[in-house]
Image: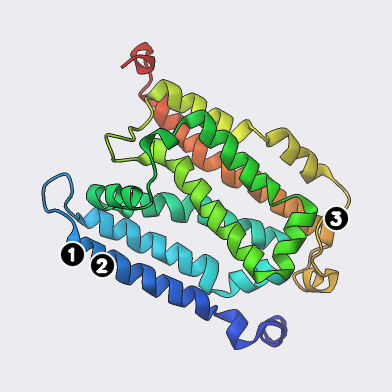
Amino acid sequence: MFFREMGVMFGIWSMWNPSAVIVLLLGIVSYIYGCTRVRQADEGRVRVRHILFFALSAFVFALAFASPLDAIASHDLFSVHTFVHLLEIMLMTPLLIAGLPVSMLRGLLKSLRVSPRSFHPAVIVISFNVIFFSFHIPPLFDETLVSGWFHLLEHVLFFVAAFFLWMPVLSPLPEVPRLKPGPLLLYAFFTVNFTMPGQILLVLAQRVFYSYPASAIALFGLSPVQDQQLGFLLMIAGMFIPFLGVAIYAFSRYDNSSWYS
């Protein structure tokens, strides 16, 4: 019964987003072409791990944007909307960075005219949080539910913000060096805690802020308030757990020289 209702609600075109499939195929073709063009020196060569990480990133993209998750996130559940964005920011983007060979990543930044000075940690943390939480202000969020172009803009800005967010953690480029363990601990702490008090207050809120249809939410056995609370709980956990891992990694390599060398 549940799956029959789901099929009636979404239909074949909503279940599998053809636009996302086209973007995915273009991305895969571009990556293959880029791999054939990179320098084969040790620094720039394509390794098996690059291909593996890129494949995982492509899989997460398909799961988030080409599968039924996208239809549910766009029309029915705030919690799934949050989950899709977490897949994009906390999984797809770092996997993509890990999947780009050094020469390909350097060429990408150069072609987009992105200066290494753009990756200042404090600016990144503030910019990421402002972008992410601005789109959760109710009027802006509701606009993403009715305007496809505005929703696309949201995804693009989230991807760009996530790319900058993860570069100080994962960058293979000497011109954009990874943070040393001491600064990395601070980076992880402020990334997670910058807006944590507001998120906790939203979890505890008993009013609905967003315009998802109550009838669609009820189909999944949730009330609108429960759906909203689950979404913000996912947001807290989805931000906290990855950067807790970053903090544990940094702490395991920490000594006083981490601040100076």
- Discs 3, 1 touching: Cβ within 8 Å: no
Q: Residues within 10 Å of mark 2 (few under 14, many from 20)?
A: few
- At mark 3, the secondary structure is loop
- For the point 71% across and 49% down, the residue is 232
- For the point 60% across and 70% down, the residue is 70
Q: Looking at numbered disc 3 in the image, what kind of residue is underneath it?
A: Val
Q: Looking at numbered disc 1 in the image, what kind of residue is underneath it?
A: Thr
- For the point 55% across and 35% down, the residue is 125
Q: Alpha-carbon distance for marks 3 and 1? A: 51 Å
- Discs 2, 1 touching: Cβ within 8 Å: yes
Q: Looking at numbered disc 2 in the image, what kind of residue is underneath it?
A: Ile
Residue 77 in view, yes or no: no
Q: Name the residue that disc number 1 marks.
A: 36
Q: Name the residue that disc number 3 marks.
A: 208
Q: Position of residue 101 (x, y in %)?
A: 25, 51
Q: Name the residue that disc number 2 marks.
A: 32
Quadrant of the rendered image containing residue 75:
bottom right
